[in-house]
Amino acid sequence: MNKKVFLLSAILLSSTLLTACSTLTLSEKSVENTIATDTNTIVMNSYPTRDRVEYVFNCIAKHGGKLDYIVQYACGCKIDKIAEKLTFAEYEAASTFTMLRSTPGENGSVFRDPAQSKDLRTRLKEAEAYAEKSCFVK
């Protein structure tokens, strides 16, 4: 029972960290990714929360599965830095191309061979490298 309560509180904490504590600075690249809303507020890099949380959980799993603050913060920081470099549509397409490029035969060529696929996969790798350097993910 205590493990379930701990896991639930960790999920709530990480989602709160993702939505409330993410800090982004405006740069020339990120200005392109801003959307003005009707109330004159600016929404930066409109990545859905569900996708941010999914990315953070996958990142935590890749880095040992520890639910400590440092890993959670670093993984949350990492998706924020990726969001500075890629719009959500670009990120989603690059992730799809990356996951499905190992599909064998002709069916996989749709994900491996087009120039758009190669370009987006390269940009995603560069954004992830930038994020790892910026957020000190080990």
Image: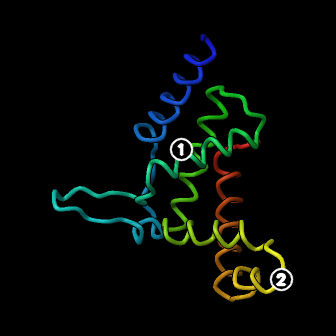
Residue at mark 2: 105
Does 2 appear above or below 14? above
Question: Residue placed farthest to the left in the image?
Answer: 39
Q: Secondary structure at mark 2?
A: helix
Residue 19 position in % (x across, y down): 42, 41
* Amino acid on which disc 2 is placed: Gly
* Amino acid on which disc 1 is placed: Val
Residue 1 position in % (x across, y down): 60, 11
* Viewer-proximal residue among 4 and 17: 4
Q: Is residue 35 left or right of residue 113?
A: left
Taking the spot 72% from the left edge, 39% from the top edge, the residue there is 61
Residue 53 position in % (x across, y down): 53, 44
Q: How many marks?
A: 2
Taking the spot 72% from the left edge, 70% from the top edge, the residue there is 100
Q: Is residue 6 left or right of residue 133?
A: left
Residue 118 position in % (x across, y down): 71, 81
Question: Residue placed farthest to the top in the image?
Answer: 2
Q: Is residue 29 left or right of residue 127?
A: left
* Viewer-proximal residue among 97 and 39: 97
Mark 2 surroundings within 10 Å by alpha-carbon count, few (fewer than 14), some (14 through 19), many (20 or more): few
Mark 1 surroundings within 10 Å by alpha-carbon count, few (fewer than 14), some (14 through 19), many (20 or more): many
Q: Secondary structure at mark 1?
A: helix
Residue at mark 1: 53
Counting residues from the N terminus, which is met first, the one under dot 2 or under dot 1?
Answer: 1
Does 10 appear above or below 93? above
